[in-house]
Amino acid sequence: MELCDYINKVREDFPILSREVYGKPLVYLDNAATTQKPLCVLDAMRDEYLNVNANVHRGVHYLSQQATDLHEAAREKVRGFINAGKIEEIVFTRGTTEAINLVASSFCESQMQPGDEVIVTEMEHHSNIVPWQLQAMKRGIVVKHLPITDDGRLVCSSTSEAAEPSGDDIETYITERTKIISVAHVSNVLGTVNPVEEIIKTAHKHGIPVLVDGAQSAPHFKVDVQAMDCDFFAFSGHKMYGPTGIGVLYGKEDWLEKLPPYQGGGEMIDKVTWEKTTFERLPFKFEAGTPDYVATHGLTKAIEYIDSIGFDMIQAHEQELTRYCMEQLMTIPDMHIYGPQLSTVRSAKGRLLPTGRKNCQLSTVKDAVVSFNVGNIHHLDMGTLLDRLGIAVRTGQHCAQPLMDRLGISGTVRASFALYNTKQEIDILVAGIRRVAQMF
Ligand code: PLP
C-alpha cells in the first residue's frame, strides 16, 4: 500500500479528523498541544467504565481486582514502551507537568541546600522552569539556564564550522553547586531535538542526575531510558494519542528510593499511626489517592496503537511532513521560520539533507514542529484567520516566554504534526497563509 493510502486508512481511526469547522474540512495541526484519540482508546475507556469500573488496589471483589489488573498492566506496558528496567520505576502522574513538579519538590527537599544549582535550558516549556523557580523561592536554590544559538540549538550542541558538536561545553556551566540538570528532549516551539545522551554523559561524569522532559519526544520516536541513561524521564499520555489527565514519571530506582513522597494520602502509605507513618514501596510511595485507572488503561491502548504502526513509520512520515512543510513555507515572501533550519530535517529515507556543515548530528535534527511568522503579521491575527479556513494551529508564546524573549518576539504561529497528518493538509495550510498574507 502507498504511504498516503496507509495514512488515509489511519485517519479513519480518528473520527474527529473528518469533521468540519466553519463549513471547512478540519486541518488539525496543533498536535504538540494535544493529539486526537483513536477509537481503540475511546472504546477501551468506555468499556472499562461500562463493565469493569471499581477502585483499584483496595477491593477483594472481582471488579476491583479486574480494574487493578488493567491498571498494573498499563504500568508494564509503559515500562516496555520506554524500556525501563523495572515496573517500580514507573510512576503514574497527571502529566509531564506533575512529573517535573514531583522531582523538583522531592529532589530539592532531600538533595539540595540553599545556593545549590539546577541547570535548565533557554528553550524550556514553563513546566520545566516554574517548578524549579518555586523551589528557588521556597528553598533558596539557584536556577541557571543553558543558552541557545540563533537557530535554536543548545550552545553545547551547535554545529558551527569551528566547533564539532559536543556535550562538553555544558561543563562550563557545571559548578560544584550543580545538583541536577533538567532539559527538554524536544523543544515544543522549535522542534529542536536536544543531544540528551551527550548531556547525560557529561553530567554523570560529575555525578549529576539528569531529568529529561519527554513531552515532545515520546509521541514521535522510540525512547529507551536505559540506553539514554537518564535519571528521570517525564511525558504525557494526551500528546501521544492517549487520554488527558495521565502522564508518567520514570525514575531510576535508586533515585526514587532516595526521594521523599511528593503528596500524602491513601494508596501511598504502609502504616499510619498518630506517632509515625511509613510509606508504601515503589512506585506507590509517589501515587497518593485514587489514580486515574481508566486513563491508564486508555494509555495502554494508545501505546498498542503506536506499536501497531511502529515508530519507524511514524518518524519517517513526520520527518517528511516537517521537511515538506518547511520547503513550502519558505516559498512564501517574508516567511521567518524559527529553530533549526531545513538542513537539519531528515529526508524521507531517514538521512539528513545535504547541509554544507560538518558533522551535523542526527541528535540535533528538527522534529515535528514548525514555528514561524510572516512579515509583520501578528501571530494571533494569522492564527485567527487560518482558523476561519478550518486550519487549527497554535499561536502565542507556547508556554515558553523566556524563549520568546531570547528570540526577541512576542510569539509565533506553530504547526505541529502527528502520524495522521498529510501533505495535502500542509498544502491547505500554505494556501491559507498566502491568502491571509494578501489581506495585510
Ligand atoms: N514540556 C513540554 C516540552 C511540553 O511541550 C509540554 C506541553 O506542551 C509540557 C512539558 C507540559 O505537558 P502537560 O501539560 O501535559 O503536563
Image (cartoon, grey):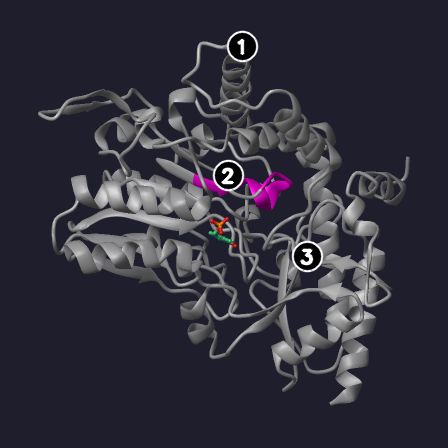
Residue designated by label 3: 354
Residues at discs 1 and 3 in contact (Cβ within 8 Å): no
Residue 253, image quadrant:
top left
> Magenta residues?
234-243
Residue displayed at 54% across by 74% down: 411
Which image quarter: residue 169?
bottom left
Q: Are marks 2 and 3 in contact (CB under 8 Å)?
A: no
Q: Position of residue 56 (x, y in %)?
A: 46, 21
Query: Which residue is denoted by mark 1 in the rendering?
Result: 62
Q: Earlier in the sequence, mark 1 or mark 3?
A: 1
Residue 3, image x, y percentages? 85, 41
| Residue type marked 3 | Pro
Ligand 1 within 8 Å of disc 1? The answer is no
Give the structural element (helix, strand or loop) at label 2: loop
- Disc 2: which residue: 246
Please tell me whether mark 1 or mark 3 is closer to you in this view. 1
> Image point 49% across, 18% down: which residue?
68
